[in-house]
Amino acid sequence: IVLVQAVLALLCGAELFSSRAPKAVKDGSAPTEGAQAAAAPASAEASPWRHVATVDFWLMFVPKIVIFTYTQFFMNFLGPLLHHVYAFSHGDATSFAGLCSGGSVIGLLIVGDRVYKKLSLDKQAMLVAVLLLICFAVPAALSFEKELPVDISALVVPLLFLWGVAYALPFYLPPGEFAMRIGGKTAAALFTNLFDAGGFTMSFFWNRWATKASKDGDFTVVLQSLALFAVISIGMPICMMKQHYAALSTASDAKKLA
């Protein structure tokens, strides 16, 4: 899967660069020096790869690839966690793991479509920050459960369901919208593939590590790593706020020029 995503990203880049190459005149002759000089800066200015060197790209890229591990946890580790740590039967563990994973559907259809998409970019960033706080609090609380003053084992399913609701929106919507903003219709697929390739690569190595770390039925370190990823992902709302203020600045400058 990682190889496929990498190939797709390379193909997208090759297509974009080839489509912007200076065209020869109809008689087959090479373009003139003037045409080359005019085409060069235009091509450089239009190159989507320039965004990879920006802070905003990495503020969005890193959170996307680390949140990717949440999908792997809910698919591959949630059932074993419920069985080994909370003594659910295999059947119940599988059923409740599916229920908790279904929280992501609620996160997209209700929180995403009915709340997030109606907000301005700065308020969207605040909502994403709140959701990431939940993504930190739940695995952190479960990993330090023995040190808590109250027993939260009876709340494990509701907490995991809440986590499923919380991570879905930051995982899907902000990275896709960011790709559209910086790439437009022509290069959005390129950035989407870069995000996916990075996410699959991160998940590949995290999966191998998490499998070894939890082989004795102890998921403490695995949960702590997922809580850490939520902290790292705070770069996502920061990126969104930066783009919000950049857009305000651009609009303000346009009004002054007008």
Image: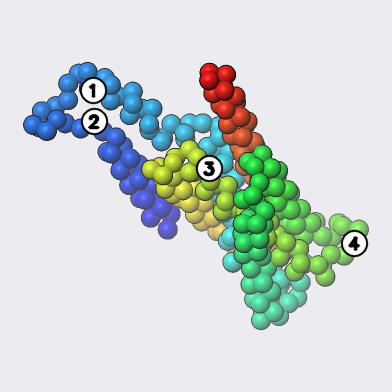
If you read the primary sequence from the N terminus, does the residue marked by circle 1 or circle 3 appear first? 1
Nearer-the-camera pick, 14 or 77: 14
Q: Position of residue 116 (x, y in %)?
A: 65, 51
Relative to 49, residue 111 above or below: below
Residue at figure coordinates x 57%, y 23% from the top left: 255
Depth-wise, is mark 2 or mark 4 nearer the camera?
2
The mark nearer the N terminus, 2 or 1, is 2
Mark number for residue 36?
1
Counting residues from the start of the chain, the first of labels 2 and 4 encountered is 2
Which image quadrant: the N terminus? bottom left
**Where does residue 168 sit, x and y in percent of width and height?**
62, 57
Q: Amino acid at mark 3?
A: Phe
- Residue 15, by quadrant, is top left
Callout 3 secondary element = helix
How far apart are the two marked residues, 2 and 3, measured between alpha carbons? 29 Å
Q: Which residue was labeled with disc 4?
A: 150
Q: Is residue 203 visible?
A: yes
Please state which amino acid type lies under the numbered disc 2. Pro
Residue type at mark 1 is: Gln
Q: Quadrant of residue 143?
A: bottom right
Q: Label 1 vs label 3: CA separation?
A: 32 Å
The answer to which image quadrant residue 165 occupies is bottom right
